[in-house]
Amino acid sequence: MFLLMQEGDIAVEIESGQSIEFDASCSTDPDGDNLYYEWFIYPEAGTFEATDKEMLNYYNKPRVSVSIHNKAKDKSIHLILKLKDQNEPSLISYRRIIINVN
């Protein structure tokens, strides 16, 4: 499992056919507001196209599990985390995880 505590893009490597978890539960809002989590695949940026439903479990929770399909071997998958607070206007932050599949 990877904890998302750093700024900027994160790159990881994984074998095809495996799953990997990411955890953003240590994220906080400067005003103490509740956070809403949204994980999604950004297919235009990667070299493997798949839908969120095919790859992600619990896409609206602090933790997400990504199932890497065997067909993703030697490709990249770009996973995006969108964090949004409950204020109006909302503050939104994004993190990109680049998953390189071996």
Image (spheres, helix red, strand yellow):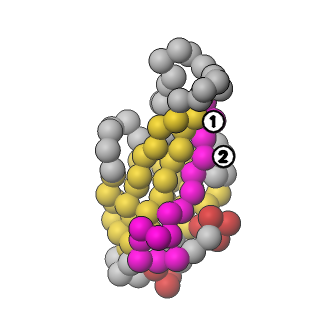
Q: Which mark is residue 60?
A: 2
Instruction: State which tag comes first along the sequence, 2 or 1.
Output: 1
- What's the residue at 48%, 30% (across, down)? 26
Nearer-the-camera pick, 77 or 15: 77
- What's the residue at 37%, 61% (across, down)? 98
Which corner quadrant holds the C terminus? Answer: bottom left
- Rendered location of residue 100, percent (x, y): 35, 69
As displayed, is residue 71 above or below residue 84?
below
- Kind of residue at badge 1: Tyr
- What's the residue at 51%, 22% (across, down)? 29
- Rendered location of residue 11, percent (x, y): 32, 57
Residues drawn in magenta: 34-49
Residue neighbourhood size for the residue with mark 1, other residues' Cα within 10 Å, grouped as few (<14), some (14–19), many (≥20): some
Q: Position of 90 compared to 94: left or right?
A: right
* Mark 1, residue position: 36
- Rendered location of residue 75, percent (x, y): 38, 78
Farthest top residue in view: 31
